[in-house]
Amino acid sequence: MSLTHFDEKGAAHMVDVSAKDATAREAVAEGCVVMSDETLALAIGGAAKGDVIGVARLAGIMAAKRTADLIPLCHPLALSKVTLDLTADQALPGLRVRAAVRTTGPTGVEMEALTAVSVACLTVYDMLKAAEKGMRIEGIRLVAKSGGKSGDYSAP
């Protein structure tokens, strides 16, 4: 198997997508921030810094739009839609973060969805670290993708 971001000599390069058809593409990613029950109560009820969930949602959306600035070989994409859902999960305890990203273009949006989740989780950590420095960011992964030459993918 060859990796698309390396040429025949092994040098890194941006993949040429100019010959690819623009198709509808979507990717969904998820992750979570594990914390104590007390810190989760702050996240849900409003911490001293404000609306933790709302700020993390906006940070994730902004991050998806800036993915090409953060990941060296990603193409800048015109995103059609970015949604982030942050939900409390008492079983963790913590917050579950899920991002869905859509575009119509010649390349997929998996990295944008993963970046959105990662930055949203980091924002939750930043806003709650005064209450608990031992929080854990876990399980960031691609859940599903559709569109493109490689077809659809759903995580097991």
Image: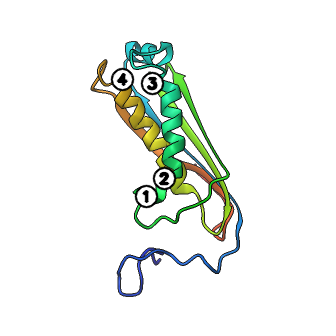
Mark 3 → mark 4, Cα distance in angstroms: 11 Å
Mark 4 — residue? 128
User: Where does the image place residue 60, in percent across and percent down from the top left?
Assistant: 50, 40
Tag 1: amino acid: Asp
User: Where does the image place residue 129, in percent across and percent down from the top left?
Assistant: 31, 25
User: Where does the image place residue 98, in percent across and percent down from the top left?
Assistant: 56, 38
Tag 4: amino acid: Leu
Relative height, residue 32 to residue 114 (above, below): above
Mark before the other along the chain sequence, 1 or 4: 1
Are dots 1 and 2 in contact, CB under 8 Å? Answer: yes
User: Where does the image place residue 16, in percent across and percent down from the top left?
Assistant: 54, 78
Mark 1 — residue? 69
Residue 94, numbered circle? 3
Which quadrant of the view contains residue 110?
Answer: bottom right
Residue at the (58%, 61%) spot, across then down: 77
Residue at the (54%, 49%) spot, across then down: 113
Q: At numbered mark 4, what does the secondary structure look like: helix, strand or loop?
A: helix
Relative height, residue 100 to residue 70 (above, below): above
Q: At numbered mark 3, what does the secondary structure look like: helix, strand or loop?
A: strand
Mark 2 — residue? 66
